[in-house]
């Protein structure tokens, strides 16, 4: 059930549509208009939640800079600045970590090391990673 994001009461009446075509509600006690998405953490952002979540996930999951994430978004017709991507990551990363916490796999007791020697030019490199 939809409730007012300010006073948590059910809306008193429907109040037309907003500029995106979503149902708008009016709350008489606190004299506010709101939609079903007004209480979302993405409310007030220009881009939809899917775009913001994709950008934050790319930035956190892969070794990409904010500028590289901006280029990936630009390929999809989304024009944002690298500073915007950083702001999204700073705002939503803690909330995403909290929300995904229960679904994360527990760290096991056994660890393996995957290792390899690489010969590049005259140098010899040792590359390793821990595998759970
Ligand atoms: Zn209200």
Image (cartoon, grey):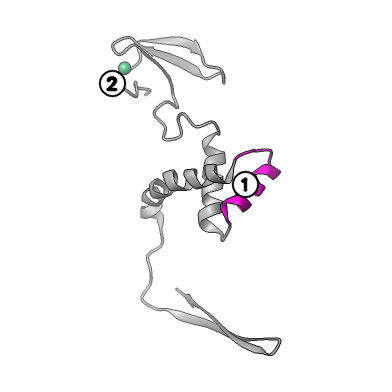
Measured from the top left, where is residue 43 in percent x and y? 45, 30
Residue at the image point whose x is 45% and y is 27% from the top: 37
Q: Is residue 16 above or below residue 51?
A: above
Task: Classify mark 1: residues with Cα within 10 Å, few (<14), some (14-19) or many (20+).
Answer: many
Q: Is residue 113 above or below residue 23?
A: below
Determine the image quadrant of residue 111. bottom left
Task: Classify mark 2: residues with Cα within 10 Å, few (<14), some (14-19) or many (20+).
Answer: few
Residue at the image point whose x is 50% and y is 32% from the top: 45
Q: Nearer the viewer, mark 2 or mark 1?
A: 1
Residue 78 is covered by the magenta coloring: yes
Measured from the top left, where is residue 14 in percent x and y? 43, 11
User: Quadrant where the N terminus lies?
Assistant: top left
User: Quadrant where the C terminus lies?
Assistant: bottom left
Which residue is labeled 2 in the image?
7
Classify mark 1: helix, strand or loop. helix
Determine the image quadrant of residue 126. bottom right
Q: What is the chief secondary structure element of the magenta stretch?
A: helix
Sequence-earlier tag: 2 or 1: 2
Which residue is labeled 1 in the image?
70
Q: Are marks 2 and 1 in contact (CB under 8 Å)?
A: no
Query: In the image, is the residue at mark 2 within 8 Å of ligand 1 by its beta carbon?
Result: yes
- Residues rendered magenta in the picture: 65-80
74 vs 96, left or right, is right
Classify mark 2: helix, strand or loop. loop
């Amino acid at each position: 059930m939809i409730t007012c994001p300010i006073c948590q009461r059910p809306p008193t009446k429907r109040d037309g549509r907003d500029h995106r075509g979503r149902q708008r509600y009016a709350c008489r006690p606190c004299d506010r208009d709101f939609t079903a998405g007004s209480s979302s953490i993405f409310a007030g952002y220009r881009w939809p939640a899917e775009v913001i979540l994709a950008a934050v996930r790319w930035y956190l999951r892969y070794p990409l800079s904010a500028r590289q994430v901006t280029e990936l978004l630009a390929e999809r017709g989304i024009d944002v600045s690298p500073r915007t991507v950083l702001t999204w990551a700073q705002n939503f990363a803690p909330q995403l970590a909290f929300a995904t916490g229960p679904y994360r796999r527990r760290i096991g007791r056994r660890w393996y090391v995957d290792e390899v020697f690489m010969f590049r030019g005259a140098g010899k490199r040792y590359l390793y990673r821990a595998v759970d």
